Structures are given as structure tokens and as C-alpha cells.
Image: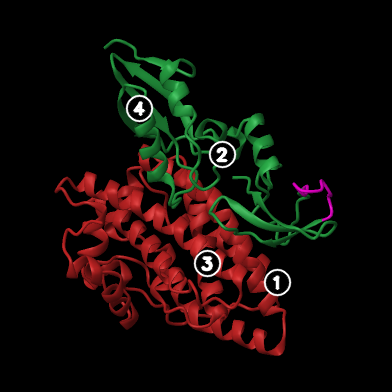
Amino acid sequence: MIAARTQSQGPAWEAAAAVPDPEVPCVTVADLGILRWVRVENNLAIAGVTPTYSGCPATLAIELSIEAALRDAGYDARIERILTPAWTTEWITAEGREKLRAYGIAPPQEPAGSVRALFGEITVTCPKCASLDTEKLSEFGSTACKAHYRCRACHEPFDYFKCI
Amino acid sequence: MTHQAFLELADDCLVLGHRLSEWCGHAPMLEEDLALPNMALDLIGTSRVLYDHAGKVEGEGRSEDDMAYLRDERAYRNCLLVERPNGDFAHTMLRQFFFVAFMHPYWQAALHSSDPVIAGVAGKAVKELAYHIRHTGEWVIRMGDGTEESTARMRDAVDALAIYIDELFESSDAAAEAEAAGVLPKRADQRAAFDATVAHVFAEAGLEMPTVSHPQTGGRNGIHGEGLGHMLSKMQSVHRALPGVTW
């Protein structure tokens, strides 16, 4: 078996990497680290994709969008869903974090704390005014990957991209 | 027989996930109306991968939909705790807390499964359930150590649900086989971690675990409470009324 070429550059990668996340459209699947690799065999482009959360309703939409983008770029396309290793917020690129912040979503700040850390608060910086005086309203936000916060300084509510 | 052990795990996740989803639009406040379906999604997502895997291991061409929508109550192999009706908010939070206090160490142990799909599922679930433990643990403390009303309700929930705990640690023949093969972790081995998590939260909440003289079991043999059939009849109705429909 000939080893397939794994790309993190080149036209197939570029096409797949530009696909925006359907729920957080300010970042692409490459920014989030969901798109792991694109492999090209003759004219077939295979994209390795890792879901963020087990029940993320966007998983299928993301896979279909990447497949469509590869077809638009002239490839036959296939998606390979990769469960191991599990996606982690550490895979979000520095550029992705900055895009999230500019969009009004506080990017993930540190690894998830101990399950015993009840009521344990981490300090999340307000993406609007950069104040550290913020409070968590709910561990669960508008999508599976976000928690709900409020800034005590500028009084704006905002989403925080949870660390997992 | 390994697929039966996977079905037990999948049924636990789907049944509890569906129960949580019943709160959607009915939770006592907006934040919880987001939190409960979020937790439901985590569990339903896990069940989908497990059903798909169980179908492939069984090798008779059953899909995840066949497993979820075309099995009757007696074919469901979930434990009794997860099928308990939602009751009030205290019952729902305590049921979730008990379940995840067991499942979190279970999935942690399953990270070392010889089956890569199980190890993959575990990798996701461990991270997701850490949030469930924190969220439900905080509510158990708030309500247990809250007002006269909330304390009474949380104590009622403890009395009602404690009888379903022991079943979490029991392995069916199918599960025991998968455990011996290193595919799944031993259920009984998770007891110490469960007890430690519950003791920590109950101490903060001022709650005591009652002595259970007659633990309830039977779910792994398909012997369920009345509530499961009612739940499945709603959950499966569209799929059964319109077989094969797509939109």
C-alpha cells in the first residue's frame, strides 16, 4: 500500500480549511482544530474530522460543508470521522482565539478544573472591555461548547468557550 | 454477546438523555433550560456512537435508529435509575448527580479499553461529564443546604432514588464477559470513587445517605418500571408511525 500524502497545506487543505463553523461562523474548522488533516489520493480528497462534543448538532453539517468545499475545489471527497484522540480546546489556534475574542466570545483560558472544584471560578476576561471582573451565569450556554458569563464592569453578558 | 453490553451502556445514555430533554421549555429558569438539554445532548450523542458500534459488533445490519426506535420496553437494558420520571427539579438533579458520579470514573477506566471505539467514546465522555458532576453537585448543595422547602425536596429525592444506586455496580452476564476481556471496566470497581464523590457533596449539602434494605434491580434483564414504556411510546411514535421517512 502506498502511503497516502497527508497535507496541512496545498489546494485541498486550503479548500477544506476555509469552511466556517456553522454555529460560530467567525472561525473556520481549521481555526478550531476540528479539521485534522486532508489526504489526497489521485483525485480523492479525504478529510479527517473530529467532533467537538458527543452530541454536537453541527457535526453532520460541518462534515457536509467540508465535503461540499472539496467537491467545489474539483476533488472527489470523503470524510473520515475521528473519535480518538478526543478533540480539546487546546487545538484552537492562536488566530482562532483572537477571532473568537473579536467576535465577542471569550476564548478558552485553561484546562478544565477538577470535578471536585465545586463552585470553583476561573477568571475569564470580558471580550468587550477586557475587565477581569466577570461572573459565571451558567456552566451551559447557547451551544454545547460555551458557558454563559456576565461582565460586572461593562454589564455585558457574553459567551465563554469552555475548556474541554 | 459483547454487543449486549454496549446496548446496556447506550440505553442508559439514551433514556437519561431523553428524560433530560423532557425539561426543554419547562425548566425553572432560562439558564437551566439551556443546561438540561445540553446535558441531554452529551448523553444522546454518546448513545448514538454506542448504538452504531453495538449494531456493527452484532453484525445483523441493525442501525442506531433500529436500536433506539424499534426495540420494545422489555428489550431495553438500561438501569432503573435513568428511567425514573423527572419528578421535581431536585429529583432530576440528584438522579443526574448519582448517574454521573458513577459514569465519570467508569469512563475514566474505559480510556484503557482494548476496543478503540469504547476508548474514543470514553475520551469525550470524561470531559463532558466533568461538567455534569460540577453542575448537578452544585445544585444538590444549593438545594440540600438551602431553604426549608428546597431541603425537604432534596431529602425526598434522596429517599426516592437511593434504592436505585446498587444496580449501577451490578454487571450482567454480557457485561461481565466484556469486562473479563478488557473491553469494558468492571462496574463494581467504581464504587469507591462514587462513594467519595457523593460523600463530598452530601457533606456540603447537609444530606445523609439512607440505609437501603431493598435495592431495586432488574433493568439489565428488561424488567422496568411503568414509566419507561410511557417514555418510549412518545420517543418512538414518529419513527413507528412513518417508517423510513426522511425530510
The amino acid sitting under disc 1 is Ala
Mark 1 sits on what residue? B203
Of badges 4 and 2, nearer the viewer stands 4
Mark 2 sits on what residue? A88
Q: Mark 3 lies on which chain?
A: B
Q: The red chain is which one?
A: B
Q: Nearer the viewer, residue A157 or B177?
A: A157
Which numbered dot is residue A72?
4
Asked whether the residues under marks 2 and 1 belong to the same chain, the reply is: no
Mark earlier in primary sequence (4, 2): 4
Query: Measured along the vertical axis of the image, is residue B78 above or below residue A72?
Result: below
Of badges 4 and 1, nearer the viewer stands 4
Tell me, yes or no, if residue A9 can be seen here.
Answer: yes
The amino acid sitting under disc 2 is Thr
Magenta-highlighted residues: A125-133
Q: Which chain carries label 4?
A: A
